[in-house]
Image: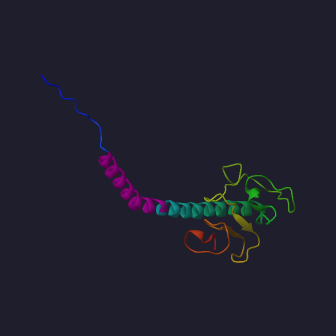
Amino acid sequence: MRTELKSRGFTLIEMLVVIVIIGVLGAIVGPRFFGKADQAKVSAAKAQIEIFSMALNSYYLDTGYFPTTQQGLKALVEKPSSPPVPDNWRGPYLSKTTIPMDPWSHPYVYTCPGKHHPDYDLLSYGKDGKAGGSGDDAEITNY
């Protein structure tokens, strides 16, 4: 009786075909997925700016004015100690104890009084963290 031993592995060509198929699928699906991730970050920045705006309006209702540029958004989580020190501060106006960064890990920019909005300007510089730009690098603002 003759026993045949058959190898039960993959050939090099079979493995290469699978790798090529995975590479083609990655090339097609990858850019679409990452494009959605950038859109999600823009949406998150818009939502965060809206939350800051609501908190700033609450601050204004309590104190009668918006925080100065120097006091910044930090005035939403702890009572300012620099003038004008608000007598009627009833914060914190945000649930977190620190001001979050934008989705690209850059600080939000707050200016009061605003150049574009009558009360204050609030913005994220976008993906590149610089003024100007277009697409994902465009500024996300409250104006």
* Residue 130, horizontal then vertical, whole percent: 67, 70
Secondary structure, magenta segment, majority class: helix
Residue for point 69% across, 63% down:
108
Q: Quadrant of residue 81?
A: bottom right
In the image, farthest residue toward the right? 83
The verdict on residue 26 being magenta is yes
Q: Can residue 53 be found in the magenta stretch?
A: no
Which image quarter holds the N terminus?
top left
Where residue 129 sits: x, y (%)? Answer: 66, 66
Percent x, y of residue 127: 60, 65
Q: Residue furthest top?
A: 1
Q: Is residue 133 left or right of residue 99?
A: left
Judged left or right of residue 39, residue 19 is left
Q: Nearer the viewer, residue 41 or 87?
A: 41
Q: Which residue appears at 51% of the width and 64% of the height? A: 39
Which one is in front, 46 or 124?
124
Task: Give the extent of the magenta segment.
Answer: 12-34
| Closer-to-camera residue (108/119) | 108
Q: Tell whether 10 sits left or right of 126.
A: left
Residue farthest front in this picture? 2
The structure residue drawn at horizontal position 56% and vertical position 64%, both measured from the top left corner, is 42
Instruction: Tally the marks.
Output: 0
